[in-house]
Image (cartoon, rainbow, N blue to C red):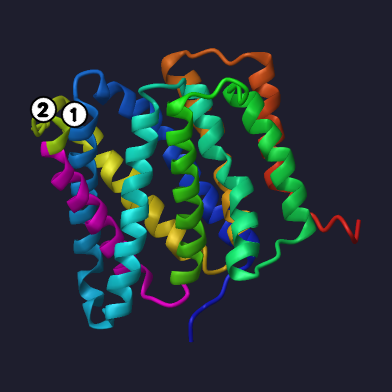
Amino acid sequence: MKKTISKTTADLGLLSVTLFWGTTFILSKQVLEVVPLPSFLAVRLFLAAIFMVLIALPRRSNFTIKTLKHGVLLGSLLFFSYVTQMSGLKYTTASNAGFITGLSVVFVPIFSILFFKAHPKKNALIGVAIATAGLLLLSGGNPLEWNKGDYLVLICAFLVTFHIILTGKFSRENDIYLLTAVQLSVTGLLSITALPFSNTPLYIPSSNHIMLLVYLALFGTVYTFLMQTAMQQYTTNTRTALVFTMEPVFATFFAYIFAGEILSSIAWVGGILILLGMLSAEIDWIKK
């Protein structure tokens, strides 16, 4: 019999995902100073795929065609979310990109209602509203000055939205280890396949970058997507998207700790609002 856990415990598991994602920004920035982005993604995602396949191999007897189909779909959504976000960043600011990507917290409850008839609770919707305001303040993004880069990142936000929704659905129907292995394998293979079209050579990691890439692959990719797949069985899509708004908060925190990047007072307010938005999902406002 499968053990069940509470929504709060699942949310804490998802919070650990955003913590590790938050560490990847400053580490990736260090590697990207000397490595072209397409090559960096190809090496990181392919390494992650190898690690995840090795972890899931003992469970291969549970593999089904459904797992293959679901994993391919999730992996494709994940890969193209990377592509559209990174392509958009060429034309827009990091602050706008951060805010627009974070709009998935708004899109998830909307599309959950439209396509899956899943109606989020009022406390989660209150949290979404608070966290969205926090995202705008933290990122400093300006939604009134959009260009083609912003619209590419908006496509990324839609892809992230469906990735969250479908992960919640598929995680209940498949072995989570095998599902994650197929997903990351598809993402890794697509990144390698796309490399020749990027006009950049395949990067062979130097000794200085090997440990960083292993960390980014193992903890920034394998752990995070495996934990997301595991925990979404026990919580809602809207709460998942809400917890994920903590990613830029952790990213900003680690940038301050390790790189000395200073946060403005407005950004601090935004970070606090995101935290309050996430916590508000745990409060039953009707009873209160």
Q: Residues within 10 Å of mark 1 (few under 14, many from 20)?
A: some
On the question of residue 282 being in view, the answer is: no
Q: Which residue matches tag 1?
A: 209
Tell me where residue 239 sits by quadrant.
bottom right
Look at label 1 and name its amino acid. His
Location of residue 206 in the rendering, given as x and y in whole percent from the top left corner: 10, 27
What element does badge 2 sit on? loop
- Asked whether, in this view, residue 113 is left or right of residue 98, the answer is right
Instruction: Give the answer, above or below, for where 58 lies relative to 36.
Output: below
Q: Residue at the location (17% across, 33% down)?
A: 198
CA neighbours of label 2 inside 10 A, class few (<14), some (14 to 19), many (20+):
few
Q: Main secondary structure of the magenta part?
A: helix
Percent coordinates x, y for residue 247 in the rendering: 52, 38
Q: Residue furthest bottom?
A: 1
Q: Nearer the viewer, residue 51 or 120?
A: 120
Q: Is residue 169 above or below residue 52?
A: below
Highlighted magenta segment, given as a residue range:
171-196
Relative placement, left or right, of 18 versus 184 is right
| Viewer-proximal residue among 126 and 273 | 126
List x then y, in percent, for residue 96.
Answer: 52, 25
Label 2 and label 1: CA atoms lie apart by 5 Å
At 52% from the left and 23% from the top, the residue drawn is: 95
Residue 105 visible: yes
Q: Residue at x 43, y 58 (%)?
A: 227
**Magenta segment: does it hold 174?**
yes
On the image, which quarter does residue 69 sit in?
A: bottom left
Depicted 281 relative to depicted 258: above or below: below
Image quadrant holding the C terminus, namely bottom right
Q: How many marks?
A: 2
The residue lying at 54 percent from left, 48 percent from top is 15
| Amino acid bearing label 2 | Ser
Q: Which residue is mark 2?
A: 206
